[in-house]
Amino acid sequence: MAKKKISQEKPGSQLKKLNFLIGKWHTEGALLQTVPGASKEIRGMDTYEWIAGGFFILHCVDVFMGKERTEVIEIIGYDESRKSYFMKAFDSRGESITMYAVLEKPGVLKLEDKKMRAVLTANKNGSSMTAKWELPGNRKTWQPWMNITLNK
């Protein structure tokens, strides 16, 4: 009896372009829109790791935004039909969100949905990243929400 060859798919080159995210990051930053008198500090950890044979990235967030702890688990993949990355996130408040992102150029990832958007920019040597987040404002404008720096 002849053995059947099993075709093994390889992770797509598009997802490999996000390799700059992989690692453990010390996260700090500031909320720009807060309740008067509330702490504006953001601090904690973000980790990105390859999972499922390199077909997806697992992003785990454990940060404090002021005194409130936020934990998030996010799966990142590539949607060939949309020519964009999808990011499905689940947080410690029981909420979930799907965002889509494009790689504007190496090390610059733009992500967006109807409720928020961000630009994540890695430095040349891969030791740090910045993220500038915005929320929708009035009349289809976007307002700064938070600025974050991640360092390995």
Image: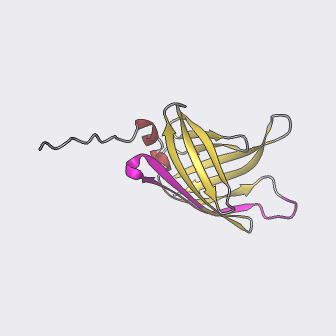
Q: Nearer the viewer, residue 74 or 61?
A: 74
Which residue is situated farthest in the front direction here?
1
Q: What sort of colour scheme is used for the picture?
A: secondary structure
Residue name at image x 62 percent, y 45 percent: 98
Which residue does the image show at 58% across and 48% down from the upper left? 88
**Is residue 146 on the magenta stretch?**
no
Depth check: give the residue in front, 48 or 4: 4
Q: Residue furthest left?
A: 1
Instruction: Tell me where residue 7 appears, x and y as whole percent.
Output: 28, 40
User: Please, which residue is most extreme toward the right here?
Assistant: 36
Tag count = 0
Give the vertical position of 99 relative to 105 (above or below): below
Q: Quadrant of the N terminus?
A: top left
Question: Seen in the image, is 41 located left or right of residue 120?
Answer: right
Relative placement, left or right, of 105 versus 93 is left
Quadrant in which residue 117 is drawn: top right
Query: Magenta residues: mostly which secondary structure?
Result: strand
Residue at 50% in and 49% down = 21
Question: Residue 56 vs residue 61: left or right?
Answer: left
| Residue 54, position as x, y percentages in the image | 40, 48
Q: Position of residue 49 (x, y in %)?
A: 46, 55
Q: What segment is highlighted magenta in the picture?
A: 35-61
Vertical side of 15 occupied by 34: above or below? below
* Residue 50 among magenta residues: yes
Question: Which x, y percent locates residue 142?
Answer: 78, 39
Residue 142 in the figure: left or right of residue 152: right
